[in-house]
Amino acid sequence: MAIRVIIADDHSLVRQGLRRYLEMAGDIEVVGEAANGVEALRLMENGAGEPDVALLDIRMPEMDGLEAARRIRIEHPGVGVIMLTAYDDRQFVVEAVRAGARGYVLKARDAEHLIQTVRLVAGGNMVIDPQLVVALAEELSDAKVRDRKAETLTAREVEVLQLLAFGHTNKDIAEQLFISPDTVKTHLEHIFEKLGTSDRTAAVAEALRRRLIE
């Protein structure tokens, strides 16, 4: 029985090329194509039905591959997600794994590598491109350290973060908490270090992701 695959990439030429390579394998059938994550999910619900594997580009309009992977993990847990991307940034790899992806393949790899990855993921295996395994291990280790640091946020630092999330300036925060602007700046430096971020926006986003604030 053929492995059923859907492809989601916002470039039609890429989708056509992937379809051609995959279907040359003989045991893989491409049952649908989508230009973004929204269309991919719609295909699973109304069009192609639930495939064995969803091949997703990370960067797509409307809904990117990471968000689509998270939705698929919840709504279609039996589908194996493979991220196909031109980016070898370690953070992309970590986010893909956290989103539920079972495979991560660089577009620079050859067709045979992709075909083998599809077969392995369809069989329930996890496949990370060999070039990225070390980077993934290092990033996950660093993430554990950051998580432990985040657990040490003080009550005052959480208050500062919450006010940041509401869009308050350092001066506003100082006035509301009855502290000096310099103290606010010091709190922010500690927050950035503990969350592994470098600016206010990233700190708020990370705090929301970890549900440290609401």
Image (cartoon, grey):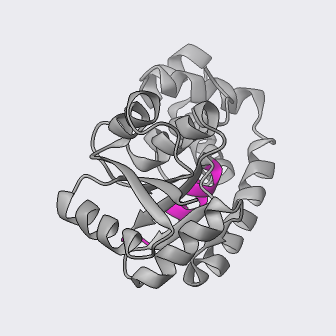
| Residue at the top extreme, as displayed | 176
Main SS, magenta region, reads helix
Residue drawn 55% across and 39% down?
72
Total labels: the figure holds 0
Residue drawn 53% across and 22% down?
163
Tell me which corner region of the image, top left, top right, bottom left or bottom right, holds residue 150.
top right
Q: Is residue 179 visible?
A: yes
The quadrant the N terminus occupies is: bottom right
Q: Is residue 57 visible?
A: no
Residue drawn 53% across and 39% down?
50
The quadrant the C terminus occupies is: top right
Q: Nearer the viewer, residue 87 or 10?
A: 10
Q: Is residue 23 above or below residue 200?
A: below
Tell me which corner region of the image, top left, top right, bottom left or bottom right, holds residue 142.
bottom right
Q: Is residue 161 above or below residue 133?
A: above
Q: Position of residue 38 (x, y in %)?
A: 36, 34
Q: Position of residue 193 (x, y in %)?
A: 64, 53
Residue drawn 69% across and 30% down?
212
- Residue 95 sits inside the magenta stretch: yes
- Residue 91 sits inside the magenta stretch: yes
Residue interval drawn in magenta: 86-98
Q: Position of residue 91 (x, y in %)?
A: 53, 62
